[in-house]
Image: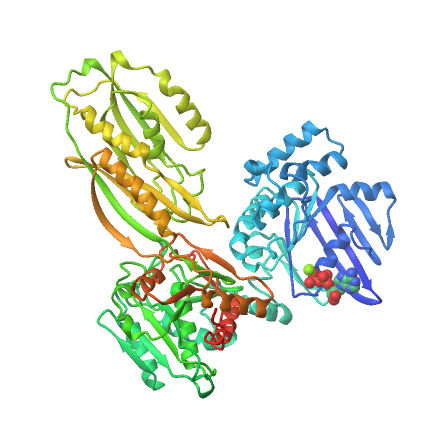
Amino acid sequence: MKEILKVEKLCKNFNKEKILKDISFSLNEGETLCIIGPSGSGKSTLLRCINNLESIDSGTVIIDDDYLINNGKYSDKKTIQNINMNTTMIFQEFNLFPHMSVKENVTFAQEKVLKRSKKEAEEIAIQMLRKIGLEEKKDFYPCNLSGGQKQRVAIARCLAMNSKLLCMDEPTSALDPELVGEVLKVIKELSNENKTMVIITHEIAFAKEIADRIIFMDNGRIIESGKDVIENPKNARTKEFLKRFNYSKGDEVMKLEDIEPKEVFKYFKEISDIPRNSSNEEKIRNYIIDFANKRSLKYYTDQYYNIIVTKEADEEYKEYDTLAFQAHLDMVCEKTNNSDHDFNNDPIKLIIDGDYIKANNTTLGADNGAGVSIMLALLDSNIKAPKIECIFTVQEETTMIGVKEIDVNKITAKRIISLDCGKEGKMVISSAHCMEWYGKVDIVYEEDVDLDDYYIYRLEYSNFKGGHSGGNIADKTRGNPIKLGIEVLSKISNVKIIDISSSGKVNVIPREFKIVFAVDKNNFNIEDIEEILTQQREKFSEESIVFEKLKNIKNTIKIMNENTSKRVINFIYNFKNGALSFDENNNQILSANLGAVNIIDEYIRIDYSLRSNNNNLKEDYLKSLRKQIKDNKIDIIWSQELYGFEPNYESSLVNNVSKLYERITGNKMEKIITQGVLEGGFFKNRMETVDYIAIGPNTYDVHSPQEKLSIPSMKKTWEFVKEIVKLNFNENKQ
Ligand code: ADP
Ligand code: MG
């Protein structure tokens, strides 16, 4: 196997201080080397030396048979230029040119350094952008990309240079946690394709997965290297370093004594031992009663197992307003196929994975166990504070019966802080009012049908992306196959529906739609719809759109009459669907989802839902919807209404809490207007003057077995909560 990189006895000093001491290692073609080690151990300096971004004091570096430096003596300029072309480096901070489009960023060095023609450079750029999944962003500027996308572009730029050695210095550490995955995925693909790479990373699990070789550095030296440094560290320093990642077998039970904030994780562990799926909250409620009794705290509880625990004000906070915190006790119970976990009896097994806590192939319950444990820690602490009311609700994940039925007269606070936001540094200030209903159109079939008068067609959409009707609906690449199909039919006169069906339900964007219909042989021109079908196929090239004439039709087939068909088609065609309104900050504040359409016995059922964060917009929408309903004679059946709350930018709670956050962290607190449904809407609906926000530590992939909770963000949130209770809202009233 060919050696691409060889380093021998490399030494580097900064101001006479020895930073790299006798570093020797080599790397074969196609191998992935990961360098791990504590901050300041010299990892970046080593990579910078190899990339000729830092001068080397002594030693030898050979890259693809060329000497960069031989025993302390640098090669001639030409050789070094050649080496420079054969090594590329990706940095933490992406370093894209802000004034160039994505495509220009990728072509620039190709033209300048490799002297490729513009045409060739562009072809290669597109190829590389496709590889990292960002071809459609080629004309964007970096400022319009997420951090993860920027880093992927930086990778594409390096790949386009076709260099022998690709170096990366902590490529994901400047990214928000939710963006790390997409970049790691690209790197993993490169590793699978046997790109020769040196990667400095703190993603230990990732390093273990992709590395052919791992080097552990500490204090300017290679302490240990090999394939299984992470699984089987030999050196005491390596062991010590890896301890905080807890990798030995990947399923070690959480050691609470090691994790900050201990006072919160103590409760997180305790509640994880108590099964608490929705509708099964009695045990966890009893645990909280016991908790309150032991501390002589007053509580109120009800038949639904809601519980409110009160902690009286400390003397110096007597004059302050009472403050409430809120979290839900229940959790979604999901597990992987191979898990034999019993959610009714087994404790959730906690695993530390680097900076995260996750469960063993099950949901973790950080949604909203993170909030529950912060509240318990607060009730347990001796932090001086005003009167605190901690509200624990039930069945948030299913019926919301807890918040619908809790006796709000037992809450004296005028301000409630929910701990169910799931995004540290952000604050939910509005949730959606959600209305779900379905329309019914009774079917009248055509009598005395002569099938010879008709052509019969099938139009079928499948493999669409679908998604959540609140969170994903603004994404136009998803498309709504029902709307698309009906758009085609609206171009044909005298359509008669034979069969109509879709996937999905009211709060999900449909992924499939099928309609079989008859058209009048003498009055049908296929050209009327060819153009629109072509447009749709171009726009949704990865999805499937099938349009075909059916033969051999059974003569028992039933055809709906023109009136029935027309009403369905008109109604769906005119139904305003998708993300419909945005506020000045580009938050989506009104959206509607046509979720499903199906034949149920003797009628066609059309499911749809509306989400709104603004009452005026909602009323306007309903007015136009009612007109459609009336015009097309649709029967409406309400299924449910979930309450939301509008943003209140004057709120003392919103303003004081966000100002405090900025004061503590130096960062702005982002205000979120969500189209999701939160318990806050129900509190607001039932307690007119209450002020409500939601905050909380970072959680990821909630409701799935990949769910995880960020340990550092739990610490930040806890520190923040301890400061929030000291705010004097009374004094700072606006
Ligand atoms: P790592 O990447 O492992 O965190 P670095 O290679 O960045 O470590 O740093 C190793 C040591 O070298 C640190 O003590 C750092 O302060 C020092 N160092 C890095 N760059 C310079 C520089 N340009 N001038 C002086 N000291 C430096
Ligand atoms: Mg570094």
State left or right for residue 21 relative to residue 655: right
- Colour mapping: rainbow
Q: Outermost residue toward the left?
A: 448
Residue 257 x/y as whole percent: 49, 77
Q: Is residue 504 at all visible to an observer of this figure?
A: no
Q: Is residue 591 at all visible to an observer of this figure?
A: yes
Q: Nearer the viewer, residue 260 or 445?
A: 445
Q: Is residue 315 above or below residue 50?
A: below
Q: Nearer the viewer, residue 273 or 721?
A: 721
State left or right for residue 695 relative to residue 10: left
Q: Image quadrant of residue 84?
A: top right
Question: Quadrant location of ligand 2?
Answer: bottom right
Which part of the image, by quadrant, shows the N terminus? top right
Q: Nearer the viewer, residue 425 or 253?
A: 425
- Seen at 47% across and 86% down, the residue is 316
Q: Is residue 60 above or below residue 554?
A: below
Q: Outermost residue toward the front?
A: 734
